[in-house]
């Protein structure tokens, strides 16, 4: 049976921290879906199609990884993909507490779901999409924090 894992997030934009987790996960699981959440309540900088395209451009060299957008509840998305493995990254203790709460909720809704929590590589552990958006807003250099596709897209803004 093929193991399909889902790495969900808003990816607004995808960062080198995300890529670190995706690459490491791609060595563990047979298939990874980067699930880009519509997240209308977050008022994203980039629209859903742009975020999906930036993810796909950034992961194109990983043959067992793809990205697609979704709207609605993550638990329903996992069921639609027949995936029961959820990949999450944690940078801090607060992240871990939040992810633990989510994991427990998912277990109540779907007992077959397993959550794999990965700590980031120390070289990218401080990077967040929020930090990158702040740098973009202030016209700073984001090249060290994001994949090339994001840098190119931001130049077009």
Image: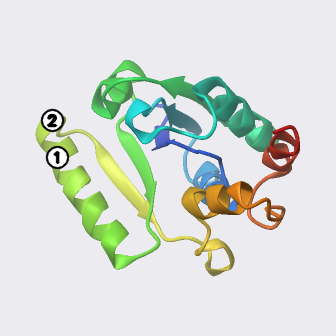
The alpha-carbon separation of the residues under discs 2 and 1 comes to 6 Å
Quadrant of the rendered image containing residue 74: top left
Quarter of the image containing the N terminus?
top left
Quadrant of the rendered image containing residue 101: bottom left
Q: Is residue 12 above or below residue 132?
A: above
Question: Residue 129, percent across and down?
Answer: 59, 56
Label total for image: 2
Which residue occupies 65% across, 30% down?
52
Question: Residue 108, percent across and down?
Answer: 11, 41
Which residue occupies 70% across, 63% down?
135
Q: Looking at this rendering, what residue extends furthest in the top direction?
A: 80
- Label 2: state its secondary structure: helix
Q: Is residue 83 visible?
A: yes
Badge 2: residue crowd in 10 Å (few <14, some 14–19, many ≥20): few
Q: Nearer the viewer, residue 115 or 90?
A: 90
Which residue occupies 48% across, 35% down?
4
| Mark 2 and mark 1 residues within 8 Å of each other at the beta carbon | yes
Question: Residue 141, percent across and down?
Answer: 83, 64
75 sits to left or right of 122: left
Q: Which residue is mark 1?
A: 105
- Label 1: state its secondary structure: helix
Q: Is residue 57 above or below residue 92?
A: above
Q: Which residue is mark 2?
A: 109
Q: Is residue 98 above or below residue 1?
A: below
Q: Is residue 24 visible?
A: no
107 sits to left or right of 93: left
Question: Residue 148, percent across and down?
Answer: 86, 50
Q: Nearer the viewer, residue 142 or 66?
A: 142
Quarter of the image containing the C terminus?
top right
């Amino acid at each position: 049976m093929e193991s399909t894992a889902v790495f969900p997030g808003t990816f607004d934009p995808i960062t080198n921290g995300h890529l670190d987790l995706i690459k490491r996960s791609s060595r563990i699981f047979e298939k990874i879906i980067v699930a880009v959440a519509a997240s209308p309540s977050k008022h994203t900088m980039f629209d859903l199609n742009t975020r999906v395209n930036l993810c796909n451009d950034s992961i194109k060299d990983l043959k067992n990884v793809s990205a697609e957008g979704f709207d609605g509840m993550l638990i329903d998305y996992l069921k639609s993909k027949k995936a029961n493995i959820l990949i999450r990254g944690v940078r801090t203790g607060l992240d871990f507490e939040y992810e633990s709460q989510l994991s427990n909720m998912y277990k109540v809704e779907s007992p077959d779901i397993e959550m794999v929590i990965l700590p980031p590589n120390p070289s990218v552990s401080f990077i967040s999409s929020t930090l990158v958006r702040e740098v973009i807003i202030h016209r700073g250099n984001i090249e060290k924090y994001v994949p090339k596709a994001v840098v190119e897209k931001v130049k077009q803004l």
